[in-house]
Image (tube, grey):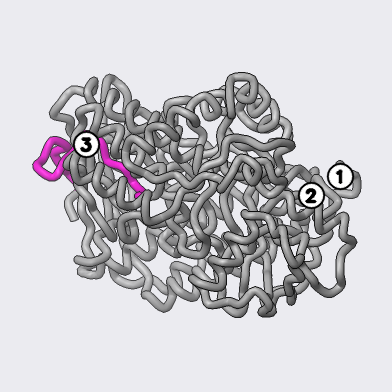
Amino acid sequence: MRNDIDLNHADGTDVLVIGSGIAGCCAAIEAARAGARVAIACAGGLFSGSSFFPGTWGLGLIGPEDDKDAEDLVETICRVGGGVADRALVETLVAGIRPSMAWLEELGVALKRPASDTSAHEAAFIPCFDHKNRLWRGLTRESTQRAFARALDGLGVQILERCELMDLIEADACGRRGVAGAVLFDRTAKRFVTIAAHAVVLAAGGTGGLFERSLTSRDVLSSTHGIALAHGCSLINIEFMQMMPGLVAPKRGIVFNEKSFRFALMEPQPDASLLEMRAAYGPFTCRLPSCAIDLTIDRAGADGLAVRYRFPAEDVPEFVQVFCDWLEHEQGIAPDAELRIAMYAHAANGGIRIDADGFTGVPGLFAAGEVTGGMHGADRIGGLSSANGLVFGRRAGRAAAAWAARVPTPLCGQAPAMPSAGITEKAARDLTGRMRRTMSEHAMINRTDAGLARALADIDAIRTDMELFAAPAEHDEPAVALAIRLRSQLSLARAMLEAMRARTESLGSHYRADDSGQERTE
């Protein structure tokens, strides 16, 4: 491992993108279109993370129908967000959605549309937490992957698969200390590599990797936030995260379609009006009386709550029919089968603080997608997570390319010193399991001051216990990589717990069970 590196060496690039979901791919494509040399690194394979999670048919994408609807959507996002969203980011997001939909189609993405104008105005097509129908499009994995692969290949973007972000390289740029590359761990070759870059875009996903049950792939490691914090970034709204019902049987890790709640039979059977209310949105919120259903599911624990469907003989909404057909034909689960559902960590509503161009405030460092926050708030309208990755991914890519063009070359930087010791694979597995159990017990739906304080103590104890399992670093780079990853994850876990503890009132997805003054509205 080299500490002194020339940031203009042969392995360097203008823009390095970390993450290959929607935000990362959009950033890489736009940066390359702007003339930058681009590399994209991902901890797993290309096209991974929440954007291409196999446990659902695809992703919904919503936008405003026209200018008047755009004004309404901005106001609705701010209201649903509980007043803690950044209005400037909200306005940027909404303004960029329709142009970005057109951009996707220009790339060759076949956007799914409602079957008819009639079905487009069904209640099932009203986005989560919204009050009206919007412009709806669907992103399927196959079409999106094909179009992105074509664009990345045609633009000469270098693909670095199974290369995990370990740390960022700092250098003097434009008179200020900033980011000018990254240290990656090549998980195939089992060695560290340094990549020089005039700009870095973080797009490595959200916080789901900190929890036992997560509706995302395991290559969403949730270590990027901790690395960003160590280099001067700040977090916003990190206490807010989406928690969704998902299947634990007959298969695990499959998103439960909320629109089907209105046809669900469970024990105890909720009032029909609560089921109808709960069918209007996917993630948990404490704002509505139907949160009682989520609390019932949560109490069922890891084994899940038993659910069966009772569908009408005809007129099943298209959105529900698509889900049931997908379950039967793609997952082998019959419509009349018993499902067991439990609460899963899903998407983060908060993350790294950015401006409208994805700039983090740290020179040379940009971010986009679920790793960021500010554009959603306490609750997020359905279809806006993919819109967020699309809009801010494109903007961050263009801004990173512009930054790279301004930075003088060559630069001299110093790769960060690696830890003096690593940890064994078994120790990493055990300690990561402890972290995930602690976060799942105290930082999911039911949060209390006592529980969050206990969790903070547990996180600190895990960090201390890492020293008990120290393994010599020399000639064992995989052990060092495991230690770096866990420390970064623990940094994010602590930041989340502190934010959850500081917000003593219940708000949206943040439910304080010890908040006696909480109010719910219809």
Q: 402 above or below 186? A: above
- The amino acid on which the numbered mark 2 sits, given as a three-letter code, is Cys
Q: Residues within 10 Å of mark 3 (few under 14, many from 20)?
A: many
The residue lying at 47 percent from left, 55 percent from top is: 50
In the picture of the structure, the residue carrying the numbered disc 3 is 413
- The amino acid on which the numbered mark 1 sits, given as a three-letter code, is Arg
Q: Which residues are magenta?
A: 3-20
The residue lying at 45 percent from left, 64 percent from top is: 218
Whether the magenta-drawn stretch holds residue 16 is answered as yes
For the N terminus, the image quarter is: bottom left
367 or 277, nearer to the observer: 277
N-terminal of the pair, mark 1 or mark 3, is: 3
Helix or strand or loop: what does disc 1 sit on?
loop
Can residue 298 be seen in this snapshot?
no
Q: Report the number of discs.
A: 3
In the picture of the structure, the residue carrying the numbered disc 2 is 286
Where does residue 443 sit, x and y in percent of width and height?
67, 58
- Please report contact status of discs 2 and 1: CB closer than 8 Å, yes or no: yes
Helix or strand or loop: what does disc 2 sit on?
loop
Helix or strand or loop: what does disc 3 sit on?
strand
